[in-house]
């Protein structure tokens, strides 16, 4: 199936640990994103990569480091996990807007990774 | 500053009743507005965008620049409409950055 996939689906870990979440899209899109959904369901963008280049970097602690080995993958590595990092992390992808195009292309979301820090 | 406000955290209606999910935005330029929906155990997906001016699953949304609103409406709610709805704004930065509202859970009771 063509889609945006994330692994793992659930991640439970202790404070202070380092963990990674992987994202892959096989839609041929140029841009990938990471979003954080907190316990109140508030969804906020963290990072965006276009053709492996970082284009959005919101005010996120530098313990969070995205890595894009190629344009189909955008992984999220988190160092020294804290309780407040517990959330659902969503990966998304979209095709570039055509030059001069009328509208932003739809973002396709992954299923989410529920991170619980104990 | 760019901001999207969805004042209702939960909206509960009976099947067949009209639905209006409110969305107000703050943006000085010409925004692009979207509604995304997340059904239970499914991914977040695009429902509609103001540019296309189409009706999806009976839902419509009109951009009102005077009131800076983009309310989502449906004349007759169905049980399968129960979901979390997010209003989102894209500004002119052309980075693809979406600013999401807090989300409204729509509960349609039988």
Image (cartoon, helix red, strand yellow):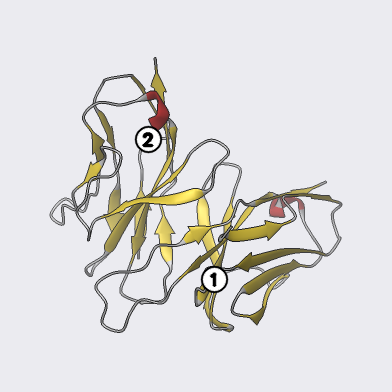
Could you give the CA–CA distance between mark 2 and mark 1, rounded to whole angstroms? 30 Å
CB-based contact (under 8 Å), mark 2 and mark 1: no
Name the residue located 31 percent from the left edge and 84 percent from the top edge: A99
Percent x, y for residue B1?
35, 65
- In the displayed orientation, state which residue is furthest to the front: A1
Q: Same chain for marks 2 and 1?
A: no
Tell me if residue A18 comes above or below residue B105 in the rendering. below
Local SS, label 2: loop
Q: Image quadrant of residue A57? A: bottom right
**Quadrant of the snapshot with the N terminus of chain A:** bottom right
Name the residue located 29 percent from the left edge and 54 percent from the top edge: B25
Percent x, y for residue A106?
39, 62
Name the residue located 45 percent from the left edge and 51 percent from the top edge: B45
Local SS, label 1: strand
| Tag 2 residue | B8
| Tag 1 residue | A32
Q: Image quadrant of residue B100? A: bottom left
Q: Say if residue B12 shows up in the picture.
A: yes
Residue B96 falls left or right of residue B50: right
């Amino acid at each position: 199936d063509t889609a945006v996939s994330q692994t793992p689906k659930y991640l439970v870990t202790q404070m202070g640990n380092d963990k990674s979440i992987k994202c892959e899209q096989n839609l041929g899109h140029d841009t990938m994103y990471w979003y954080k959904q907190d316990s109140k369901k508030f969804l906020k963008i963290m990072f965006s990569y276009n053709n492996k280049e970082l284009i959005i970097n919101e005010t996120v602690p530098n313990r969070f480091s995205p890595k894009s080995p190629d344009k189909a993958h955008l992984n999220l590595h988190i160092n020294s996990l804290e309780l407040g990092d517990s959330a659902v992390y969503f990966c998304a992808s979209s095709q570039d807007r055509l030059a001069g195009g009328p509208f932003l292309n739809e973002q396709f979301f992954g299923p989410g990774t529920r991170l619980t820090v104990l | 500053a760019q901001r999207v406000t969805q004042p209702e955290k939960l909206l509960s209606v009976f099947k067949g009743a009209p639905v209006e999910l409110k969305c107000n935005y703050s943006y000085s330029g010409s925004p692009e507005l979207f509604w995304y929906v997340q059904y239970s155990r499914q991914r977040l997906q695009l429902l509609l965008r103001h540019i296309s001016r189409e009706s999806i699953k009976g839902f419509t949304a009109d951009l009102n620049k005077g009131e800076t609103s983009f309310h989502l409406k449906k004349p007759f709610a169905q049980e399968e409409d129960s979901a979390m709805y997010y209003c989102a704004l894209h500004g002119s930065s052309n980075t693809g950055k979406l600013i999401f509202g807090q989300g409204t859970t729509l509960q349609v009771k039988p």
